[in-house]
Image (spheres, rainbow, N blue to C red):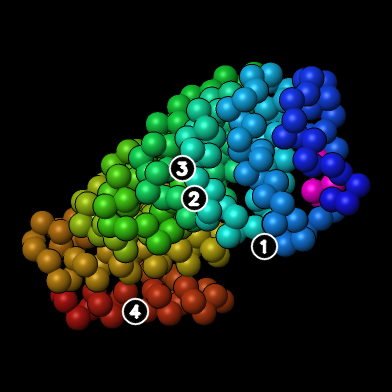
Amino acid sequence: LASFHYQELVTPTSNDELLRLLQALNVNLKKTDFSSIAHLEVDRLLVRKLCQISSHRLLEALLVALDTLWAKSDAQNSVLNCGSDAISWLLQLWQQFPELVCRILTVCAKHHKEQLIPDALPLVTASHSTATMDDESYYDSLRLLFVKELALNATHKQQWILYEQLGDFILLNNFQEIEVVTRILWNWAISLPKPILLNQAVWRYIRDHWSHSVQTQRNLAAVVGNLINTACSNHREIVKAVEQQDWMVPALFANLETYDADTRRRSMRTLRCLASNT
């Protein structure tokens, strides 16, 4: 950023001048490694500006800069150290800039689950006018990627909040991002096997999307494996829920013919578990 006077962002300036500076910053950030500017704390300066301006154009340019900055692979420590105020201001801007803010908070989700769960979840499920969206399906994919990042390595309590508030939203909305949904289910099957086992909407989703793609088969074979393992060591109500899935055993056997070794291994392990408990 040698050619960009980032300190000018600190001093009061007109909206037009601030917009010019932010646009210049965006151009420079695309060419710069984060490690070379980390000491300048440009992102902290941008976050402070979030609460100082109200112009839609200025906020959009600022968010684009923050998005570009934090998306860099070497920016994780900076994301980790961003304060709770930054998350709070970003959450307030979600409705106004849903795609940008959702993308930025997906980067933050790794380090700030405690604040984002449950504060961000009502925003995930809120409807937005498609007139403000460049691509509604793109926004759907961003929301699901955000939830997937929240679910990854979340605590049992956090997983329960995610499942309780977003389970129906994810399972019943017919999202096209099936591989992302199955990865979320995988996390829930590990942390919350009993409620997942007893949810017929989960079983319908697994059945209906079993053969969508190799990655989907792999993920769902892992989901079923976790559920079956739980069922084999629990009371009759849970075992009965598994027995009702008459499509499952043929689907697992069919997986043994796939070329994907990981899917074959997971399916065989699940079949062995079933065989040993019948």
Image: 57 above or below 172:
above
Q: Earlier in the sequence, mark 3 or mark 2?
A: 3
Q: Earlier in the sequence, mark 3 or mark 4?
A: 3
Look at the image and say whether residue 152 sits in the magenta stretch. Answer: no
Which mark's residue is nearer the viewer, 3 or 4? Answer: 3
Coordinates of residue 55 in the picture (x, y in percent) = 69, 19
Q: Nearer the viewer, residue 191 or 118?
A: 118
Q: CA distance from mark 1 to mark 3?
A: 21 Å
- Residue at coordinates 82% horizontally, 33% vertically from top-left? 21
Q: CA distance from mark 1 to mark 4?
A: 39 Å
Number of other residues with Cα within 10 Å of mark 3, as a class: few under 14, some 14 to 19, many 20 or more: few
Look at the image and say whether residue 26 sits in the magenta stretch. Answer: yes
Residue 153: numbered disc: none
The residue that label 1 is drawn on is 74
Which mark's residue is nearer the viewer, 1 or 3? Answer: 3
Q: CA distance from mark 2 to mark 4?
A: 33 Å
Query: Is disc 4 placed on a helix, strand or loop?
Result: helix
Residue with the most extreme right position: 3
Q: Earlier in the sequence, mark 2 or mark 4?
A: 2
The residue that label 2 is drawn on is 109
The residue that label 3 is drawn on is 84
Which mark's residue is nearer the viewer, 2 or 4? Answer: 2
Query: Is disc 2 placed on a helix, strand or loop?
Result: loop
Coordinates of residue 113 in the picture (x, y in percent) = 41, 50
Image: 230 above or below 54:
below
Coordinates of residue 80 in the picture (x, y in percent) = 52, 55
- Residue at coordinates 19% horizontally, 81% vertically from top-left? 276
